[in-house]
Amino acid sequence: MGSKALIFFALLSFSALSSLKTSSAAENEEDPGLVMNFYKDSCPQAEDIIKEQVRLLYKRHKNTAFSWLRNIFHDCAVQSCDASLLLDSTRRSLSEKEMDRSFGMRNFRYIETIKEAVERECPGVVSCSDILVLSARDGIVSLGGPYIPLKTGRRDGRRSRAEILEEYLPDHNESMSVVLDRFASMGIDTPGLVALLGSHSVGRTHCVKLVHRLYPEVDSALNPDHVEHMLYKCPDSIPDPKAVQYVRNDRGTPMILDNNYYRNILDNKGLLLVDHQLATDKRTKPYVKKMAKSQSYFFKEFSRAITILSENNPLTGTKGEIRKQCNVANKLH
């Protein structure tokens, strides 16, 4: 092969390599992934609007903050943080909201309230998945929890994941091994799991989910002093799922996200089986005891776990879409 041919092939190879690098750089520029303050140029007021809406809604409906906190887990833990949770059922697919694991979830209409406020400022810019994540962040603050800086730049999925939901969301009656495995698959370690379950410090548990610990016989692991209150709140062995029958997760500070939950479960006052297991399993108990003693440690691990959860396999760049309404994919809008 002559020297001219060698030079030609060398130039061709260099040109192909340069083209590949340029294409890769363009892709990276097009899709920065999740970043802090993603909307700083496209919608500078976005995060302030969401924060203000969360504040106003909490002032009128205190239980919205519990909903925002539960939303981030139920959405982000199921394969991707893409607001699939918010989609309504269609003729072809069932909504995740209607599954048994989503029992008791509510206030979805107020996500639309936040979305509408953001849309008035910046139409078609801010995703429902980012609204879901940021409302959880600000809801945590409303409940007295830590402020957690979270990245944005998520886009919205186009389909419900109801058919696989149970593969990802552990049930409250599952073994601790199953629960640990499900969280580990998202990159959340044991102290992170223990901290996330500290969300049970606020809100309430419907009698439907705990009567199996009261009837036909009371679970001997329950604190007898707490049983009396539980029986008073849940007098029926087969409660009506539509009735407002529930027990506060933490009778001492029911509206505050704090480490009182850990003291309660160490005292056998956990309502759900998973709460009891958390306090007794040798893999989790050391962290329960540590968090019961130190709220700052609880907040540190909780913040870390929420951050990991919020970044679970998001859609970014040109994947997915920016929904016009959070409960309907754009193709059906």
Image (spheres, rainbow, N blue to C red):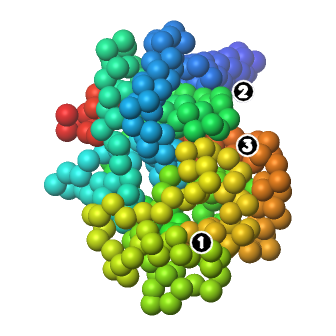
Q: Which residue is mark 3?
A: 299
Q: Nearer the viewer, mark 1 or mark 3?
A: 1
**Residue shown at 29%/54% (left/top)?**
95
Earlier sequence position, callout 2 versus callout 1? 2
Residue count near mark 2 (Cα–Cα under 10 Å), binned few <14, some 14–19, many ≥20: few
Q: Which residue is mark 2?
A: 1
Answer whether residue 40 is visible to the viewer in this image. Answer: yes
Q: Amino acid at mark 1?
A: His
Earlier sequence position, callout 3 versus callout 2? 2
Q: CA distance from mark 3 to mark 2?
A: 69 Å
Q: Position of residue 43 (x, y in %)?
A: 46, 13
Judging depth in this view, the residue of 300 and 261 nearest the camera is: 261
Q: Amino acid at mark 3?
A: Phe
- Secondary structure of the residue carrying numbered label 1: helix
Q: Is residue 331 left or right of residue 124?
A: left
Number of on-image labels: 3
Q: Name the mark on residue 226.
A: 1
Relative height, residue 107 to residue 91 (above, below): above
**Residue shown at 47%/76% (left/top)?**
231
Q: Position of residue 284 (x, y in %)?
A: 76, 66
Residue count near mark 1 (Cα–Cα under 10 Å), binned few <14, some 14–19, many ≥20: some
Residue count near mark 3 (Cα–Cα under 10 Å), binned few <14, some 14–19, many ≥20: many
Q: CA distance from mark 1 to mark 3?
A: 27 Å
**Residue shown at 83%/64% (left/top)?**
286
Judging depth in this view, the residue of 62 and 132 nearest the camera is: 62
Pick the quarter of the image with the N terminus.
top right
